[in-house]
Amino acid sequence: MIVPMKHLTLLCVASEKKATLEKLRELGVVHLNFGDVQTESLQNSVDSLHEAEHALRILADREANKPFQPSGKSTEAITAERLERPLPEIDTSNPIPSILATETERETMLNMASQLESGIAAYRPYGDFDPEAVARLEAEGFTVRLFRAAAGNEKQVAAARDAFAKEHPDGIFRLFDTKERGNYGVIIVRDREFQLPPELEAVELPSERISTWAEWRERAFQRAHRLEEALAGAIPQKDPIKRSINRFSEQAVFEQAFGSMQSQGAVSWITGWIPEDEQEKIRDAAHGAGWGILLRDSKEGELPPTLLRPPKIFQPVVSLFKGLGIAPAYSEADVSVPFFGFFSIFFAMLIGDGGYGLIILALTLFAWYKAGKKAPKSWFILLTCFSTATIIWGFLSNTWFGVAIPFLDNPAARWLGDTSYHNIMLVCFSIGVTQLSLARLWNAVCLFPDTKFLAELGWVGTLWFMYIMTCNIVGIFSEVPKFAMPMITVSAVLLFLFSVKPSELKKNGVALGMLPLNIVSTLGDIISYVRLFAVGLASVKVAQNFNEMAIGLNLPIWLKVIPLVLILLIGHGLNFAMAGLSVLVHAVRLNTLEFSNHKGITWSGFAFHPFHKQV
């Protein structure tokens, strides 16, 4: 169920705003309405939170040995003195600033090394010359110009050289490289006004010798390596940083709440929402603290937060909603139970292989054991249920890593495995019409005794007619039953007569005009469930192909083992990952689109988040 909410207005003495919020946070039952708050204290808390999160990501990257992608340009000047600065050290008493400083220095060193490497590559064709020697030549009246021209321009470069030789017979025009990389060279001439011919592109003189840059690059790499080791040594600081993140997050929320409190004279107040069954807690707290409170029902246009409270056995599905980032609107229905049930079926059919279900179950139980009693159970319970459903489907279809095991053969597997695929498609369409009919019957029960419930029954009849037509189209039913036409006729009459009341025609007449299109669209809704068959079959076929590829290797047995194992591991690993992705796409879609459209769930709500202590 969606827990009914009461709007709360809480008043307190302005001088006790902070104490009031602290007590309210300890109570942990009020979802506060936050305003647009911009205060220095809030910004400081948010900045501290972001720094802690950044520090945690840095340590996580070091733990995973994630490679650094240099920007290619250092933000600081590259000098010998810069490379001699003392390295920052990790302060275990206050690790966050020192971790950030260490990572910043490491990134700077790697960017410097990358920039030096680019410079070395750019000037390598000219050799390891001394820029100071060039400066001495220019001081004596010579002009020194480095140049380059793209590969393929050898004729133009040769013409430029000949022209230079005629005009400056005492000058030097030397080419260093005329290979595939291009044409590189230098011109030295006693002419202050000398300009390069247009065929040649001027190259700026380097600031240092290439050998010096190579030395600095190695020093930068060495410093970066030492900094990486320091960060790796700080990995045990992850847990303290996580606690800091919780603390900063809690402080940021508190500052936002504090800034959201309005004041007039000696009185301050804040608004929010509280579950109807928690009213006594806030009343008792108000009596003890001397607050003034006003509790009322929501008004038209207000959107209270959604607090789902399904039956205990289905409680883990709330974590699934949270993970998907969805919540029904407060005025809508709680579809947790059918969502959980059908999602389990879709999960099993889309994975399509009992062997994969066994892997998911084993990994889930192992992770649950390693996580210990303090770990949240919801996701472990969900994955246990989903993997168990997949194993059951594996038994029903006798599919284990793409192989049908003879001693597990059963009538259901033989029936589902018919070569025409009619039976498995019948299962998919039957699941679809059942789920969508459930949505419409649910609406009818909620609307009764309003005459609109008859329109919902009309939709049920329409769905079953489209189910029959779909099965007939794909060849499952050889002919359309005689009762189908009377059924759709009665259903259409119910829809046109009772979807919109006469008093609503002016406001909702367009919906009546769209009714024929909506009726036809139910055919697409039923057909959409064929994805359960198509995606599941594709997963099985991919597994079978990798099996055949591995077994069919034309190699001696002693050479065959390693390639066979690699093909099976890589092939089934990729297939397993794609099957998991299909669950996120198709199982979620069938519940949040097809089913939800018929039930009238827009998923436009936001979850109830009480103001509470996190640490």
Image (cartoon, rainbow, N blue to C red):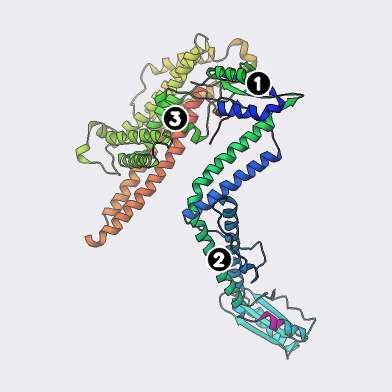
Which one is in front, 105 or 71? 105
On screen, 67 above or below 246?
below
On screen, 27 above or below 197?
above
Q: Which residues are magenta?
A: 127-134
Which tag, 3 or 2, sits closer to the chain's start?
A: 2
The disc placed on residue 9 is 1
Instruction: From the top left corner, tell me how far across and down residue 55 is, in percent.
Output: 56, 50
Which residue type carries mark 1? Thr
Instruction: From the top left corner, tell me how far across and down residue 452 is, in percent.
Output: 52, 13
Q: Secondary structure at mark 2?
A: helix
Q: Secondary structure at mark 1?
A: strand
Q: Secondary structure at mark 3?
A: helix
Mark 3 closeness class: few <14, some 14–19, many ≥20 residues within 10 Å: many
The residue singled out by tag 2 in the image is: 223
Residue 190: quarter of image: bottom right
Mark 2 → mark 1, Cα distance in angstroms: 58 Å
In this view, which residue lies farthest toward the top? 449
Residue 532: quarter of image: top left
Which residue type carries mark 2? Arg
Which tag, 2 or 1, sits closer to the chain's start?
A: 1
User: Is residue 524 visible to us here?
Assistant: no
Mark 3 → mark 2, Cα distance in angstroms: 49 Å
Mark 3 → mark 1, Cα distance in angstroms: 32 Å
On screen, 49 above or below 477?
below
Tell me if 270 is positioned left or right of 484 in this view. right
The disc placed on residue 317 is 3
Which tag, 3 or 1, sits closer to the chain's start?
A: 1
